[in-house]
Image: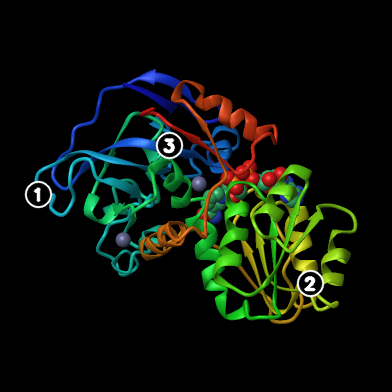
Amino acid sequence: MKALRLLEWKSDPVLTEVDEPTPGPGEAIIRIGGAGACHSDLHLMREFEGGLLPWGPPFTLGHENAGWVHSLGPEVTGLEVGQPVAVYGPWGCGTCARCQVGTETYCENPAGAPVPGGGGGLGLDGGMAELMLVPACTRHLVPLPEGLDPVAAAPLTDAGLTPYHAVRRSWPKLVPGSTAVVIGVGGLGHLGIQILEATTASQVIAVDTRPEALALATECGADMTVTAGEGAAEAIRAATGGRGADVVLDFVGSDSTLALGATVARTVGDLTIVGIAGGSLPVSFFSVPYEVSIQTTYWGTRPELVEVLELAAQGRLRARATTFPLEHALDAYHAMEDGKLEGRAVITPSS
Ligand code: NAD
Ligand code: ZN
Ligand code: ZN
């Protein structure tokens, strides 16, 4: 079969011929209906190099995946061939305290995981191929709720799950009368806005450099949009009666967006760094408003993926997706790089 593979760091992935996977004990093979193209893949292709991560190329890209069970290995019960499923992407050891509660992102026994700190599409073969192997499949597959197809579900497993996790941990601060700021309205940000709208009573302010992204933010329910750059902080302060934003979600993570986040955060607020553009923020007693909590978040938990899919099944969360056949997957990444995508690009290897 054909697969879009990252063959070495700092290079474009290549469509190559690989053997079809076969399932061992506890494993499943998924026929991929949708594989989302995440900006993290661009970071992998452009910026990462050997020694930064405990894994590396070659591997097939695609870490946000959904499809149908194609075949099951020995000892798998509770799943059926043909069943539509979403893949929970971060694969841990399954037995440590974090994995026990479904937080495989922060597995404390990485040596016991299929690959330390990674998963399918991140060190192991992912979903940008017709078939994908999923280890410990009863843990790593979530059956799709009625009415949700794999193309719609795929982006939810990362571009939906990651902002959901970030928003959910700040729920206590997102009371009526509060303000949330979303910086970067791409794949993650446009779903983040919908998640804020569906699960909180916050005023939502969206920030982006691109007018098309701000238009999408409005369609997703943002109450106000602000163009990044000069005047952005003042506009956000003014919209909060001078108090600032209770929660800032930074889906870019550059020096300038982190500085904006720190400037517009309200005392006792949250500034959550999700984007991995590599920026940094000086933190000292006087550099951020009092009692602002600054944190990074990585992906989300398995129980949260179940909740995200439920939100979508209820019609409250929907990715704006442009589909690309596997042969044109590289075009999706180039369009993302050129700022030409709306929402998410989803590769459809089985269509
Ligand atoms: P994307 O390319 O789809 O969207 C990024 C958006 O940010 C675009 O709309 C772009 O116009 C906007 N933007 C760029 N510079 C900006 C600036 N200075 N101010 C305001 N907006 C700006 O990317 P994505 O797939 O949504 O991913 C976003 C980031 O999150 C990436 O860095 C990605 O690697 C990272 N990510 C992190 C996690 C995690 O678990 N922490 C998970 C997935 C993705
Ligand atoms: Zn991702
Ligand atoms: Zn673990």
SS class, disc 1: loop
Badge 3 amino acid: Gly
> From the viewer's perspective, is residue 47 above or below residue 278?
above
Tag 1–tag 3 contact (CB < 8 Å): no
Q: Choose the circle earlier in sequence order: 1 or 3.
A: 3
Q: How many marks?
A: 3
The nearer-to-camera label among 1 and 2 is: 1
* Mark nearer the N terminus (2 vs 3): 3
Inspect this view and state whether residue 136 appears: no
The mark found on residue 56 in the picture is: 3
Above or below, 142 relative to 223: above
The disc placed on residue 75 is: 1
Using the image, tell me which numbered label, if any, was put on residue 90: none
In percent of width and height, residue 156 lies at 47, 51
- Residue at (43% x, 26% y) in the render: 4
Q: Residue furthest top?
A: 17
Neighbourhood count class around disc 2 (C-alpha, 10 Å): few under 14, some 14–19, many 20 upward: few
Labels 1, 3: front one: 1
